[in-house]
Amino acid sequence: MTSDLVDDRFRTAARAYFVYGVVYWLGGVWLAFQGIGVRAGSAVAWRGVIWIIVGLVLVLLVPFLLRRRRPGFERWVLSRRDFARVVSVLMAFRAFEVARIALRPDGPSVPAPWGGAVTFQAGAAVFFVVTVAALVFVARAAWTDDEP
């Protein structure tokens, strides 16, 4: 029974990270196609494509590793719990950085996919909420004791 509870926490963490990853990836792709970020400047456009691919790999790989035990990964790299701890620390850092953008007094806007414009602060506020929500599930899986 304890193993089922632990597995449920990690499956939930994997789903939460996947949603978080998709939101960030889509946002990053949209910004890249607007010329903001890694694709800014045509001479380095290929670097933007590489980062988009790397982002997609992470969106798929992290939930894959969190969802269930992977003996080869756990034997040679990190346990699933330690991996979740590393991921949660990185997510906490991301939340901090996005919060700094959201709290800036002024900043540029970017065209919204649905028309109009979205300020960087408003976009960062949405990303902050998504990050913290996913972080709660990943941290819960990482730091909750196995015993009920």
Image (spheres, rainbow, N blue to C red):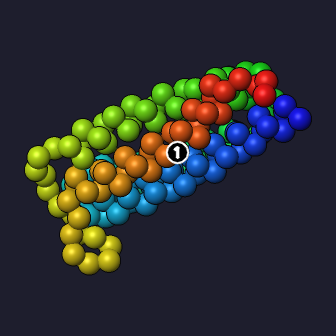
Q: Is residue 42 visible?
A: no
Residue at the farthest right position:
1
Residue lying furthest front in this view? 148
Residue pictured at 58% horizontal, 26% vertical: 85
> The C terminus appears in which quarter of the rendering?
top right
Other residues around mark 1 within 10 Å, as few (<14) / some (14–19) / many (≥20): many
Quarter of the image containing the N terminus? top right
> Can you say whether 140 is above or below 23 in the image?
above
71 or 85, nearer to the observer: 85
Front position in the image: 69 or 101 = 101
x then y, percent, for residue 135:
51, 39
Residue 13 lies, in percent from the top left, at 63, 43
Count of number-bearing discs = 1
What is the quadrant of residue 41 in the picture?
A: bottom left
* Location of residue 49 in the rendering, given as x and y in whole percent from the top left corner: 41, 55
Decide: is 4 above or below 119: above
Q: Percent position (x, y) of residue 138? A: 59, 37
Q: Which residue is mark 1?
A: 134
Q: Which corner quadrant of the image does residue 26 belong to?
A: bottom left
The image quadrant that residue 70 belongs to is: top right
From this viewpoint, is residue 128 visible?
Answer: yes
Q: Amino acid at mark 1?
A: Ala
Residue plotted at (77% across, 34% down): 6
Q: Is residue 70 left or right of residue 81?
A: right
Decide: is 24 above or below 3.
below
Q: Is residue 73 above or below residue 50?
A: above
Q: Is residue 75 left or right of residue 125?
A: right
- The residue nearer to you, when weighing 133 against 11, is 133
Left or right, residue 65 beside residue 41: right
Describe residue 90's horizontal placement relative to residue 108 as left or right. Answer: right
- Farthest residue, direction bottom: 115
User: Residue at left 32%, top 73%?
Assistant: 113
